[in-house]
């Protein structure tokens, strides 16, 4: 069993920054692919970013490329999402997810491919 706990959300003005963290339990954290998804009120859950176990391969939705950076520290069992240049449309609950499988690139963006989910952390971008 894997437990994921997100933190770091909050209220920030447009153009501001936040860093989300996702702490994971489980001795084999380093073998997981990790992803961040978000869900805004009245909208479907949306892929944001993902990172493979090595930390070398990363994936982003087009709308956050150049603004968000996903990274992981396997020694700390933690994955991060650094969010810069935040926009009101980034407002959502951000969820961390873990996959125990080696996902092909075309599947790493699909929430249904992930095995474990955190409870989420609220990010609100507003002036």
Image (cartoon, helix red, strand yellow):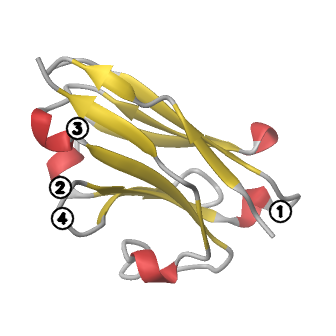
Res 94 seen here: yes
Whichever of callouts 4 and 3 sits on the residue coming sooner in the sequence is 4
In which quarter of the view is residue 41 placed?
Answer: bottom left
Residue for badge 2: 62
Whichever of callouts 1 and 3 sits on the residue coming sooner in the sequence is 1
In which quarter of the view is residue 49 placed?
Answer: bottom left
Whichever of callouts 4 and 1 sits on the residue coming sooner in the sequence is 1
Name the residue located 61 percent from the left edge and 79 percent from the top edge: 102
Residue for badge 4: 43
Mark 2–mark 1 distance (CA, rounded to whole Å): 30 Å
Residue 105, how many percent across, how many down? 41, 76
Mark 4–mark 1 distance (CA, rounded to whole Å): 33 Å
**Compared with residue 86, is residue 69 higher up or lower down, i.e. above or below?**
below
Q: Nearer the viewer, residue 29 or 53?
A: 29
Mark 4–mark 3 distance (CA, rounded to whole Å): 24 Å
Q: Is residue 14 left or right of residue 60?
A: left
* Secondary structure type for disc 2: helix
Of badges 4 and 3, nearer the viewer stands 4
Q: Residues within 10 Å of mark 3 (few under 14, many from 20)?
A: few
Name the residue located 49 percent from the left edge and 29 percent from the top edge: 8
**Compared with residue 52, is residue 7 higher up or lower down, i.e. above or below?**
above
Name the residue located 76 percent from the left edge and 64 percent from the top edge: 2
Residue for badge 1: 28
Q: Is residue 44 left or right of residue 119?
A: left
Q: Residues within 10 Å of mark 4 (few under 14, many from 20)?
A: few
């Amino acid at each position: 069993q894997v437990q994921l706990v997100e933190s770091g959300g909050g209220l920030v003005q447009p153009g501001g920054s936040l860093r989300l963290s996702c702490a994971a339990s489980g001795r084999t954290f380093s073998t997981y692919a990790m992803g961040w998804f978000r869900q805004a009120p009245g909208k479907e859950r949306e892929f944001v970013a993902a990172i493979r176990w090595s930390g070398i391969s990363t994936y982003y939705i087009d709308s956050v490329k150049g603004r968000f950076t996903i990274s992981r520290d396997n020694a700390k069992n933690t994955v991060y999402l650094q969010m810069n240049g935040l926009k009101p449309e980034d407002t959502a609950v951000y969820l961390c997810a873990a996959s125990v499988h080696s996902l092909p690139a075309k599947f790493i963006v699909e929430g249904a491919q992930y095995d474990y989910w955190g409870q989420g952390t609220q990010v609100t971008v507003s002036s």
